[in-house]
């Protein structure tokens, strides 16, 4: 055995199994044995023996919805790629937080762009999805599209899948469906450019909600007194009129909404045809579309992304998730910045969905780069008594692996599965001590011990 981990508590990732003491043995890149209790013979056979007393061992976290971890066009807006240093930083944060597999769902980056074509790779296993449909590309162009080359524009779903994209999506996004990225990026930029006033993300959201409604269903109505009062409060009328400010917001937010909604339908249809899961941006402006698609395409395999989206009230989030669950849709929630950072979001919607037993999977999403860790959310669920530790861990291991055909080899601690393993403090699962990927120890005692050449490009 190459590695034997002993004396740790064990969660296998199936949603139930918890052993107070057990062992996991690794041979090459696979799990070779897993036992409850302690077998000294097995321990003695380990070339490397990890005494994990006081720790808990579980499958490496699979983050099924993240952004900014592949080179190539960023986000459903097809924006220019993030700088290399940012991508390294984002990947390192996920890795140090116990994630071993990550699905970058920006949607327009290609499999060949995962590592930037530089040949250098990072120990975090990154995969990409495809949203290369005519309407998704039109939606990207309506809001940005500056990161798209001819090759991206000519790509289609089938070719991207043949090249290695593992799923479909993200259909829509905060950029193209009036969500968070409009609040923290596009709207403040447009308002500053046209009025000379800088507004904070929260204020951009308030202006957008007052003018267009949380579901973007009031765009045809004239600005009301709430909107006028907000414009005055934010000093936007110094050099502009109410109508001019309303036009800036409408133009920035609404242009991409119709093609983005059409893009959701294209991906759901492709899911029916290919059998691959389609990850759809689920928020107040898209919830009805996602429900209608689930109903009209019963053979599609839809993942309703971040059902705790802040555009919904807790009651709306629960009602949407309940309708989708009845239609067989997977309910995903994202940490966003709502666990500890609290930059723009709170955990209210996530708590409501967990409380109703409606959550299947847990991811981070991006939240402007301020996402909180999956294990921070897991720890919170456990200490608040919302879920047992095995139930909470399954949301980001076994449950995710079941959705993606490419992940049939991971997500559970069982013999023959890939040796992707996270070892954390038993009383705080977000305190990660060791991470093993493909049988190699990558994080040791909280520090990255992978060769520096694989981390620094
Ligand atoms: Zn999204």
Image (cartoon, rainbow, N blue to C red):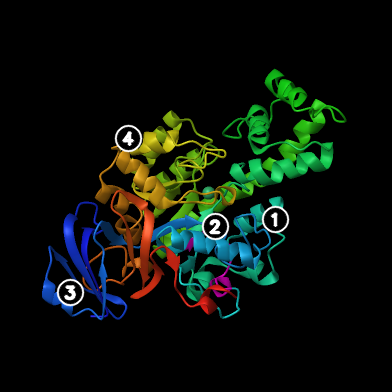
Which element is circle 4 on? Answer: helix
* Residue pointed to by mark 2: 67
At 58% from the left edge and 52% from the top edge, which residue is drawn? 369
Tell which residue pokes out farthest to the top in this image.
225
Front of the two marks 3 and 2:
3
Q: Quadrant of residue 78?
A: bottom right
Per the model, the C-alpha gap separating discs 3 and 4 is: 41 Å
Asked if residue 386 lies in the magenta stretch, the reply is: no
Asked if residue 108 lies in the magenta stretch, the reply is: yes
Q: Position of residue 414 (x, y in %)?
A: 22, 67
Q: Quadrant of residue 218?
A: top right
N-term-proximal mark, 3 vs 2: 3
Horizontal side of 43 relative to 77 (left or right) equals left
Q: Which mark is residue 43?
A: 3
Which element is circle 2 on? Answer: loop
Per the model, the C-alpha gap separating discs 3 and 1 is: 58 Å
Per the model, the C-alpha gap separating discs 2 and 1 is: 19 Å
Front of the two marks 3 and 4:
3
Residues marked 3 and 4 touching at CB (< 8 Å): no
* Residue pointed to by mark 1: 141
């Amino acid at each position: 055995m190459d590695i034997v981990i002993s004396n740790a508590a064990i969660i296998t990732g199936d949603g139930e199994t918890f052993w107070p003491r057990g062992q996991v043995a690794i041979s090459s890149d696979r799990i070779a044995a897993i036992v409850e209790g302690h077998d000294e013979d097995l321990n003695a056979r380990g070339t490397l023996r990890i005494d994990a007393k006081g720790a808990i061992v579980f499958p490496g976290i699979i983050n099924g919805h993240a952004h900014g971890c592949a080179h190539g066009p960023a986000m459903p807006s097809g924006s220019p790629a993030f700088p290399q240093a940012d991508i390294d930083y984002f990947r390192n944060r996920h890795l140090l937080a116990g994630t071993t597999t990550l699905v970058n769902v920006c949607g327009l980056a290609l499999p060949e762009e995962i590592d930037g074509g530089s040949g250098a790779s990072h120990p975090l296993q990154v995969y990409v999805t495809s949203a290369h449909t005519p309407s998704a590309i039109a939606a990207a162009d309506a809001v940005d599209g500056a990161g798209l080359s001819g090759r991206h524009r000519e790509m289609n779903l089938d070719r991207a899948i043949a090249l290695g994209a593992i799923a479909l999506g993200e259909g829509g996004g905060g950029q193209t469906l009036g969500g968070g990225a409009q609040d923290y990026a596009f709207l403040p930029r447009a308002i500053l450019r046209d009025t000379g006033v800088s507004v904070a993300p929260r204020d951009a959201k308030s202006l957008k909600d007052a003018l267009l409604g949380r579901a973007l269903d009031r765009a045809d109505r004239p600005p009301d007194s709430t909107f006028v009062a907000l414009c005055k409060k934010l000093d936007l009328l110094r050099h502009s009129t109410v109508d001019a400010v309303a036009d800036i917001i409408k133009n920035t937010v609404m242009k991409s909404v119709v093609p983005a909604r059409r893009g959701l339908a294209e991906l759901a249809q492709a899911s029916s045809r290919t059998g691959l899961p389609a990850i759809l941006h689920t928020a107040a402006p898209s919830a009805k579309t996602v429900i209608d698609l689930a109903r009209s395409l019963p053979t599609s395999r839809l993942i309703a992304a971040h059902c705790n989206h802040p555009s919904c009230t807790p009651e709306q989030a629960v009602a949407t998730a309940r309708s989708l669950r009845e239609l067989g849709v997977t309910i995903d929630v994202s940490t966003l910045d709502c666990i500890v950072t609290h930059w723009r979001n709170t955990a209210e919607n996530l708590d409501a969905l967990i409380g109703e037993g409606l959550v299947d999977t847990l991811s981070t999403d991006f939240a402007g780069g301020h996402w909180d860790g999956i294990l921070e959310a897991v720890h919170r669920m456990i200490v608040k008594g919302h879920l047992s530790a095995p139930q909470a861990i399954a949301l980001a291991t076994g449950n995710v692996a079941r959705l993606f055909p490419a992940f049939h080899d991971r997500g559970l601690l069982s013999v023959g599965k890939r040796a992707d393993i996270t070892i954390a403090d038993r009383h705080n699962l977000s305190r990660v001590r060791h991470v093993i990927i493909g049988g190699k120890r990558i994080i040791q005692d909280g520090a990255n011990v992978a060769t520096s050449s694989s981390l620094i490009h």
